[in-house]
């Protein structure tokens, strides 16, 4: 039996199997030991086991401790061992005491296996794992079933603001929570017990759970717990501060106006809904709709950048003029609205409206311009004027419409029946939208007379609307609406084509003048429209005159000048209408070579009587003579005005003295009548 056992030991070559005396000296040695340790049988017998230990382990007393431990019970360990040639290998060692039948220690049986390759693999895995944990963007930690920390990466400490000493393995979970709250305050404030209880509840629920924690001053983290079957769990922590800020910004943008940063229509509606719910609990509220006076004129004459700056300035004023409990919103364009909460008396809204009107009527200096605007306000009260958000907002809007109709710069409360005028405007809009397709427009013409020769030299085309419901509608009643709803471009194209076609039948020395709006200049189709109208009618380009107002130049002078030069290249002439009524008329005479300027009727009315009118007309004539520009006086109504104009060498005149605007069918009669008056 002993021979068989010895033969078995000798056959085992992968394991060093040998015996030691009670003192630790080698008493037997197999081939595996020889291969493993590098000692032959003869060399090994009698060697003390400490010869196989490293110098560090020998100095630390490891061999003696190992023998003592094995004498008590089976001992198993891993560690570095040394071969005969001094090389080291990582060994798995099992050492067990051998006793005789009486229980006396007679030696030790020892088995050693070289597991260096496995250690290298395991160490590489550990290093890779450590590198992965260290380079994670998330914090990660593992807790055992007793809520003790097993491991944590450095990112976890960094995110939570903890030191390395506060996250050593074995630290209880509750202590980490306590350390976290010692370094970072939560929003809202929370105790150690509350935060610990909250997180434990997430850990214990099926599948785990997560929470978002806001840590002051400006850190937001996502915490996710994933439990395992043995009661341990893994926690990941991610800093989502940037993502949270982005989401907050997106949410803010969805509820606020981009230009003024005021609440937009969506947020206003939510605040109004909230206010109306409180009305049901006995807290009345008011809705104020605000519209800036003359804003369109400011935008058209001074440009959109000035208009935008004005809107931002007004928004800042409104913020400072209301209570914190009130809401100021920009609904669009120059429309603002206020929800005034807890209105104890209707006069509360009156006081606010008066304050707003006074503050916003003060002129503002914007980009070198003194801008005078003002505001009109409509007020509706809840519950009296409605409890539905749409209804009360409509009521305030109707009151605003009334305030603007009565002179602007004032406020009006809603009253029943106020929707009559808006309804009429809506009907007018519907009728106007069908007028062009139904061929309801007609051109009237007013003569322009060469006052040096007293002969008709041209006609200004003026549109009229023959409405089946309204009769003959003058342009002042529908052109502003056509501009507002976007029909003016189509109507303007119709005017150009019709005027050219009808003028082609007149005497060849008679020109036709057509007014062109700001909207027609905004796009790039005006030149093509003019070219098409000339080609279709056969009218010589020299017989067409385009009239523009100063607002066209101010709106986008570079683009406008480019279009005007393209029009002049076609051979037609360009005149500036209502000269002297704008901000920078003289400056625009330098930026573009106009063929004609038309002196506004406001200066002609006082000619010969008002010194300022005389001086202005005289100055305009001097400019025209110097620049070689034709001057046409508008609104001429009597012979005294003609005499004054002739004395100042004015070239042309237009007005009721010669004729009111008349249909195209009367053009030849007008020419003959005026020429006949000259001959007699």
Image (cartoon, grey):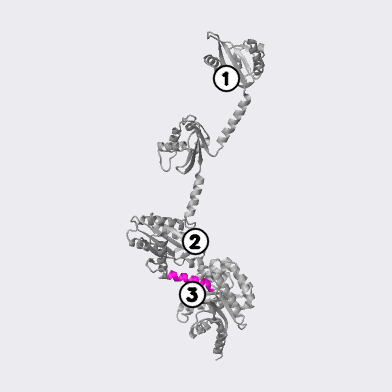
Q: In which quarter of the image is residue 375?
A: bottom left
Quadrant of the snapshot with the N terminus = top right
Identify residue for label 2: 308
How far apart are the alpha carbons under marks 3 and 2? 28 Å
Main SS, magenta residues: helix
Residue 143 in the image: state x and y as whole percent.
49, 32
Q: In this view, does 589 lie above or below 159?
A: below
Q: Is residue 104 above or below residue 463?
A: above
Residue numbers of the magenta segment: 421-435
Are discs 2 and 1 less than 8 Å apart at CB? no
Label placed on residue 56: 1
How far apart are the alpha carbons under marks 2 and 1? 81 Å
Is residue 16 in view?
yes
Farthest residue toward the left?
345
Dot 1 surroundings within 10 Å: few (below 14), some, or many (20 or more)?
Answer: few
Dot 2 surroundings within 10 Å: few (below 14), some, or many (20 or more)?
Answer: some
**Left or right of residue 267: residue 526:** right
Label placed on residue 476: 3
Residue 155 in the image: state x and y as whole percent.
52, 37
Judging from the image, what secondary structure is the residue with disc 3 in?
A: helix
Q: In this view, does 337 lie above or below 468?
A: above
Q: Nearer the viewer, mark 1 or mark 3?
A: 3
């Amino acid at each position: 039996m002993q021979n068989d056992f010895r033969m078995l030991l000798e056959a085992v070559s992968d394991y060093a199997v040998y015996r030691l005396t009670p003192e630790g000296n080698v008493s037997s040695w197999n081939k595996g030991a020889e291969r493993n340790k590098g000692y032959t049988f003869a060399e090994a017998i009698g060697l003390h086991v400490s010869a196989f230990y490293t110098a560090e382990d020998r100095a630390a007393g490891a061999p003696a401790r190992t023998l003592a431990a094995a004498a008590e019970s089976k001992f198993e360990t891993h560690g570095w061992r040394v071969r005969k040639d001094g090389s080291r290998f990582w060994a798995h060692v099992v050492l067990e005491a051998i006793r005789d039948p009486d229980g006396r220690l007679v030696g030790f049986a020892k088995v050693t296996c070289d597991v260096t390759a496995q250690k290298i693999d395991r160490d590489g895995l550990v290093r890779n794992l450590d590198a992965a944990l260290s380079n994670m963007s998330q914090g990660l930690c593992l807790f055992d079933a007793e809520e003790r920390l097993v491991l944590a990466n450095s990112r976890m400490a960094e995110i939570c603001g903890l030191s390395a000493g506060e996250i050593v393995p074995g630290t209880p979970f509750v202590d980490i929570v306590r350390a976290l709250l010692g370094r970072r305050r939560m929003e809202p404030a929370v105790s150690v017990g509350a935060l610990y209880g909250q997180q434990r509840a997430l850990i214990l629920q099926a599948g785990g759970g997560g929470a978002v924690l806001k840590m002051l001053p400006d850190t937001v983290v996502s915490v996710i717990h994933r439990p395992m079957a043995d009661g341990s769990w893994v926690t990941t922590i991610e800093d989502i501060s940037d993502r949270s800020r982005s989401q907050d910004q997106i949410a803010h943008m969805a509820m606020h106006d981009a230009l003024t940063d005021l609440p937009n229509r969506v947020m206003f509606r939510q605040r109004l809904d909230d206010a109306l719910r409180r009305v049901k609990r006995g807290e009345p509220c008011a809705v104020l709709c605000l519209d800036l006076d003359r804003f369109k004129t400011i935008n058209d004459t001074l440009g959109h950048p000035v208009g935008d700056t004005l809107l931002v300035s007004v928004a800042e004023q409104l913020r400072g003029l209301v209570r914190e409990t009130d809401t100021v919103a920009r609904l669009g364009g120059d429309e603002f609205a206020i929800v005034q909460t807890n209105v104890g008396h209707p006069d509360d809204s009156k006081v606010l409206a008066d304050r707003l009107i006074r503050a916003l009527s003060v002129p503002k200096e914007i980009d070198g311009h003194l801008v005078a605007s003002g505001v009109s306000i409509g007020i509706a009260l809840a519950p009296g004027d409605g409890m539905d958000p749409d209804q009360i907002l409509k009521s305030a809007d109707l009151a605003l419409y009334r305030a603007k109709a009565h002179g602007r710069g004032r406020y009006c409360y809603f009253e029943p029946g106020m929707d009559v005028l808006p309804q009429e405007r809506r009907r007018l809009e519907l009728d106007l939208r069908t007028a062009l397709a139904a061929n309801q427009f007609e051109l009237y013409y007013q003569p322009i007379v060469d006052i040096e020769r007293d002969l008709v030299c041209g006609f200004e085309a003026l549109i009229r609307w023959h409405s089946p419901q309204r009769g003959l509608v003058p342009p002042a009643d529908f052109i502003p609406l056509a501009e507002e709803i976007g029909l003016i471009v189509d109507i303007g194209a119709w005017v150009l084509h019709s005027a050219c076609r009808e003028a082609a039948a007149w005497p060849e020395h008679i020109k036709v003048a057509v007014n062109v709006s700001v909207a027609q200049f905004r796009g790039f189709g005006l030149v093509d429209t003019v070219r098409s109208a000339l080609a279709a009618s056969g009218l010589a380009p020299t017989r067409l005159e385009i009239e523009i107002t100063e607002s066209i130049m101010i709106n986008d002078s570079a683009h406008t000048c480019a279009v005007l030069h393209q029009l002049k290249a076609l051979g037609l002439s360009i005149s500036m209408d209502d000269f002297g009524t704008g901000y920078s008329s003289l400056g625009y005479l330098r930026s573009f070579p106009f063929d004609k300027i038309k002196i506004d009727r406001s200066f002609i009315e006082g000619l010969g009587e008002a010194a300022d009118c005389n001086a202005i007309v005289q100055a305009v004539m001097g400019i025209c003579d110097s620049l070689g520009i034709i001057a046409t006086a508008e609104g001429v109504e009597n012979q005294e005005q003609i005499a004054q104009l002739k004395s100042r060498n004015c070239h042309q005149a237009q007005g009721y003295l010669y004729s009111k605007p008349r249909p195209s069918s009367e053009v030849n009669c007008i020419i003959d009548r005026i020429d006949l008056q000259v001959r007699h």
